[in-house]
Image: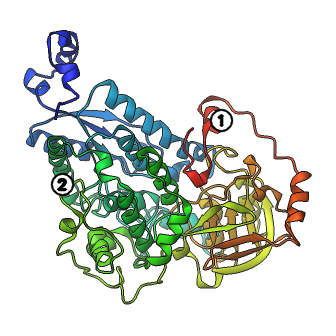
Amino acid sequence: MELKSRQVTQGVERAPHRSLFYAMGYTKEELDRPLIGVVSAYSEIVPGHSHLDKIAEAVKTGVRIAGGTPILIPSIGVCDGIAMGHVGMKYSLPSRELIADSVETMALAHCLDGLVLVPNCDKIVPGMVMAAARLNLPAIVCSGGPMLAGTNNETEISLFSLFEAVGARKAGLIDDEELDYMENQACPGCGSCAGMFTANSMNCLCEAIGIALPGNGTIPAVHADRLKLAKRAGMQIMELVKRDIKTRDIITETAVGNALAVDMALGCSTNSVLHLLAICSEAGIDLDLDLINKVSARTPNLCKLAPASNTHIQDLDAAGGVPAVMAQLAEGGYIDTSLITATGKTVAENIKGRANKNPNVIRPLSDPYSTTGGIAVLWGNIAKDGCVVKRSAVAEEMLVHSGPARVFDSEDEAIATIFAGEIKPGDVVVIRYEGPKGGPGMREMLGPTAALAGMELDKSVALITDGRFSGASRGASIGHVSPEAASGGEIGLIQDGDIIDIDIPANKINLRVSDEEELAQRKANWTPKEPKPLTGWLARYARLVSSANTGAVLR
């Protein structure tokens, strides 16, 4: 293939360009080789990224071994945990678009031949993959890997345990001493938070879709195998460049189907739906919520990882990781194994000989947690364009629930009421004006869901919102309600005391009203909440962002 970098490194006309490379210490020999962008989200503000300097260096070593010239490029990244529960969370989802745009900018402005993407946390992974799909260059994702779980009285804990512990402390179920102990134990080192939260969900799905090497989703951040994987990724990108295997050769409609099947088997974060929709939008693939439910209906849930249990990503890795899950799905005919992947081999070749080493972590097909997948999409008169729930993290007794609405126009109002002990068993907490436009930024509601769980209300109280949930949320947490309140969605018409009927197995959520005419009358007399004055980047985002059911992408 003709290398794109020749536009800046070869010919008489490019003497000025070469002089600028020489100013940085590059040699002629380096400029004669393929230029590979190593896009690293390393920073000192995100624990999932605090070690990415070492991962990026390992990638660069691999590129050099295979005859390429690696070029380090930085990326921003938001720590969702630190940004949670205040204005910072408004910037988390929008940062995904900034990341995608910046990767596109750097790759095209400097004529790079290929990319190794080094993300780890929630919005950084999909943002970089969106850019790769948009650019359609040879690209490989090489994440930083998951954090090890902490321990509390020999029980594995992680970040979500702390958010729930806050609720427990507010309810008087634990004291300050226990809370202090837990906050010093829950996150023992670098890596993406240890459960099947959004970051680990997306890193596993990168494996499933084929854009990352086997092990990307589960090898712990602190293991030497993580550095070896990074070196292999650096070497393998050179093979993809040589063979001209580009991102859209790998991210196809069928590959997305594979990723959805793995999503359902693993019980991934509801945010995976949002991000897969956005990635498909960039790749020119038509993905809608109907397909997600169809895949969920036919795919068994084989894993229950935190927050659905006390099992963590390190345990999944020890059990055989994503390849072992995919091998079982292949046996049942749930995935297509003929597809090309970033290894240069097919899915079938990648999973050959990969066995399930622990049926307590990865259930066999004959004994799944459920015959349907870990995520469900619901529709009804308050979610005409759909909403999403992590079914695998919902208690059995809450799969079907009816209760009176407790309505709040912001997360802050809701959590104050929860901490005040004013939410009662049976209630349905409704949080609106937190969607992509209304937030803006579609804040995660880990604070409210964790508070309810910590107060032992997660088995009796449901929560619905046009915002999002953290992958660490559990319980009957139903998010992404579309259309959102700020766009005239029916969630804006719910009143305190209204009965809301939730039937997750039937994929239904409805406001109990006498007839559609009652809703129409409410809408005729309804005025949306006046949006707060916005400045800066969020003002532009609110104007341009699409609905959650289309991925909350910029139009």
- Sequence-wise, the earlier of marks 2 and 1 is 2
In three-dimensional space, the C-alpha distance between marks 2 and 1, rounded to whole angstroms, equals 41 Å
Q: Can you identify the residue that label 1 sits on? A: 543
| Label 2 residue SS | loop
Residue 495 can be seen, yes or no: yes
Question: Residue 518: percent from the left, percent from the top?
Answer: 90, 64
Residue 393 in the image: above or below residue 281? below
Describe the element under mark 1 as helix, strand or loop. helix
Q: Amino acid at mark 2?
A: Gly
In the rendering, which numbered label is found on residue 344? 2
Amino acid of disc 1: Arg
Q: Is residue 410 above or below residue 269?
A: above
Indicate whether 397 appears above or below 414: below
Location of the C terminus (image quadrant): top right
Query: Is 347 placed left or right of 136 in the picture?
Result: left
Report the residue at 44% width, 34% height from top.
101
